[in-house]
Amino acid sequence: MQASPKVNDHRALSAPASTRPLAQDHDMQNREAVFHMHSISKVYQMGEVQVHALRSVELDLYAGELVVFLGPSGSGKSTLLNIMGALDTPTSGEVTFRDHNLTSAPDNELTRFRREHVGFVFQFYNLIPSLTALENVTLVTEIAEHPMPAEEALKRVGLGDRLHHFPAQLSGGEQQRVAIARAIAKRPDVLLCDEPTGALDFSTGKLVLEVLEQINRELGTTVAVITHNASIGGMADRVIRMRSGEIVEVHHNLKKLAPSELEW
Amino acid sequence: MHTLHRKLLRDLLHLRGQVIAVALVVACGVASFVAMRSTYVSLLSSQQNYYRDYRFADVFVQLKRAPEAAASRLADISNVATVQTRVVMDVILDVPGLAEPAVGRLVSIPGRRSPMLNDLFLRRGRWVEPGTDGEVIASEAFTAANKLDLGGSVQAVINGRWKRLTIVGIALSPEYIYEIRGGGSLFPDNRRFGVLWMDREVLGPVFNMDRAFNDVALTTAPGANLDEVIARVDQALATYGGLGAYAREDQLSHSFISDEIAQNRITSNVVPAIFLGVAAFLVHIVLSRLVKTQRMQVAIVKAFGYSNFMVGLHYLQLAMVSVLGGIALGVAVGWYFGLKLTTLYADFYRFPLLEYKISPMILVQAGLITLAAATLGAVGAVRAAVGLPPAEAMRPEPPARYRLGFFERFRAARSLSPATRMIVRNLERRPVRAAVSIFAICCSVSILVIEFGLMDSLNRMMDIQFRNVQREDVMVILNEPRSFRARAELARLPGVLLSEPFRAVPVRLRFEHHSHRSLILGLEKEHQLRRVLDRQLNDVSVPEDGILLGTKLAELLGVKPGQVVTVEVLEGRRPVRNLMVTGMADEILGLSAYMELGSLNRLMSEQAISGSFLKVDGKEEPTLYSLLKRTPGVGAVAIRQAAVDSFNETIRRSLAVSLTTLIVFASIIAVGIVYNGARIALSERANEMASLRILGFTRREIAVLLLGEQAVLTLLAIPFGYLLGYAVCVYLAARLQTELYRLPVYIKLATYLWSFVIVAVSALFSGWLVRRRLDRLDLVSVLKSREQ
């Protein structure tokens, strides 16, 4: 696992030594790189202004790792996640997921890629209000190839007893756990979480993080979490800090914290 | 420009699809109101002015022959104002370029023009020269259909002799606005029937009517009791072979026009009401949704100090722009269609001037009614906008509450897929909206079913009449009852394969306190060219004793089989007899009674026939026709195929306008409902749909989820539309049950299929429009957006 040789030299050099890209970690080294991002840039045309959301980012993501992206608003972390999730394509550079090239694939292939490989967790849950917890999950398992039973997915997130509740009858944390169950039920290779605790209070947020950690540990799913809560970085294998569209720091946690040990 | 106005413009631009859809529905409502109202008013005022200016009579009567002196006895009847005696005779005409014999109705006019009842409007040419033989004024419809002009001529068989009649004038009469011969014809056949006006001094002597008359028109004093006048007239003319007086409402031309005008009045109320109802509903849902999405903006604007009134007015203005656009379009289209309709009417109904008038009153009414409907639709949404305190409005709306729906309580529903459940629950969550949508689409389906269905029924009516009942090729009517020798002569005419003589006797039937004028048709015991049928089209046998009544006639008399009616014959020696009603026949045209020919002859103490039904060898038709034109004693010839053709021609002409219009109207309702419904669903659930796309649903799959709701509404509405359409057809058929004809309700499968296709295509088109937006859904923004 590593943010490969410098994205941007002067920044990398100016970064503290301890956070400089390391030689590949031993256990990570043997893992398969699922995402490979080479020199990706993203430029948005906002009216007459060009916004450089990403600038020549180089990054690999490995099977089974839990990565936390930290950075202020506008640092490019969401754009990066969107590109990984095939919701967006880079302006230049190349993204591959295993043997899928996500840079040039047509829309229907991107849809299929999302359907087969990616689970999403949003800040605001985005559950279907007209479906119960169980049905929100089955909606996805029905179109997946080798899903786990929807009940099992909900049990995994600790909602085995709330199967038949509608979103409006669940608390925010519970809704977010349903969203996670919905995302993992299809057994995705990668789980992309955009501010999963952003709308939750401290204790509920920790509960949700515990679920994410457990999914990562038990199912071996690669998990990428975007947050601007630096404390969450403690539970990651790797913490990637971004600023102004660039990776400015990659930090390997030698000892991961359990979510319950996190404080903010 | 006021800033709120700028916002208004931008909102309008943003909502343009929905604004246009609402405007189109409004336009349909206004257009139908303006077109139908103005046509109705134009027809009605043209009719009233024409009747007044040309002194259309109040009471009419035909008789055998009365000396002119008898007229004074009529004038003496109290409440009779003016009496006009006339000589009226139907003769056979030979029209240049027409193989078949035509029928000319010769009507006497004074040789010197002077005011008279049923006066002529001389379109072109001049009045007849007094005392000059062979000059006629011809009816406009007849001359137009036969391309005859001033100076042109037709040949007539008058009293067994050929006479050339030269057209010196072309005119119209309030008596023949709808120019049909009567005797079962419903549609004008202007080629084969025409009215020719002749100098009384010339016409009278030819028919042995010198200083005598056989037709009377009279007017009554205002407020006169018509029944009493009619009874007195009948009394006065009984000895002169009076055939029973009747009031204006039973006059053939008048009753057709009045029916048409009455129908116009109903449709000019009902059709616009449907559209404006739909428009009000659309304004309501579109505006409600807008207010919801702009909840935060409302809060901010109010927090800045804008008053509830200003905010309310802002949203009301938004609705009104679309409605005013619709009104403007509707007035223009309505004006055009009104003009078209009136022109079409002028083809069937001959007025001196059928002027299309659109009074400012109608436009004002249309505007006010529409604005009222739209305001009604807008008021709920506007109240919601102004009702929230700013602090509350600034908080996002609480998430929508759903629960297990009614249908899911059933076991079968438990196996439904989540996608189907989403559709079902969304519909159940807003039952009123769903119900109104269904009702509106149902109206759109039923408009088509009604229009096509009435057409089917009309075709069915003609089919029964001309394939099952009237199976003769030609009906020959003698100018007066003749002995059985005529029977043999008719059978011997060239090309005649079968001849079935009949006797037709004018009568008045009485049962208890009811009485009605009718015609007894005497048919031979074995008859196959003119059949008498029941509702299931089975033959009803004509009794050797007793009388068979048409169901409508029996209903009017209140008589049932087994009871005895009194028959007062209005011809010959005018016998009065009591006859047992043996059964009923389900007649479509006219009000007839049937007897066996021999039995009718016994009743009349005679051996006579009135004419014959002929089956003819097609190859011999020209010979037969040319001979019939020359045969003395033949009063009229009716050719079945010509009647069928004139019907088809009438339908074809009137259909061209109404069919396109109704298809467009029905489609606009369907598009308005489905498009707006889908757009609102998209606005409400864009996030939901985008999340699903992110989760790996294809565009097609989310389109099914979103548009499925509208598809379900449309599919649910269709059977209701069928039912409503059928019910309205039944209602209209019952209302159209005049004494002239009865419309059997008969709707073809193709009608249901076409209605389905038209509405389904409109719905699919609307779905496609929304689907394009769905395909452009911004997936990324959903990740960050809060609004559900």
Image (tube, coloured by chain):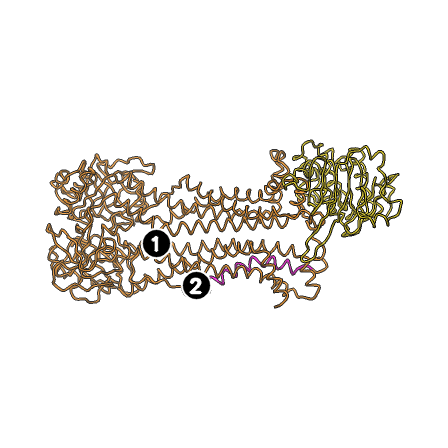
Chain colours: A yellow, B orange
B180 over A133 or under it: above or below = below
The kind of residue tagged 1 is: Asp
Quick check: is B387 in the magenta stretch? yes
Q: Which residues are magenta?
A: B360-388
What residue sits 86% from the left and 39% below the top? A256
Chain of the residue under label 1: B
Q: Which marked residue is nearer to the observer: mark 1 or mark 2? A: 2
- Tell me which secondary structure the magenta stretch mostly adopts: helix
* Residue A66 pos. (x, y %): 80, 39
Q: Earlier in the sequence, mark 1 or mark 2?
A: 1
Quadrant housing residue B413? top right
> Which structural element holds mark 2?
helix
Chain letter for mark 2, please: B
Relative to A117, say whether B257 is above or below. below
Q: Is residue A138 above or below residue A70?
A: above
Asked whether residue B275 is in view, the answer is yes
Residue tagged by mark 2? B362
Secondary structure of the residue carrying numbered label 1: helix
Q: Would you name the residue on which mark 1 appears?
A: B259
Q: Residues within 10 Å of mark 2 (few under 14, many from 20)?
A: some
Alpha carbon distance from label 1 to label 2: 22 Å
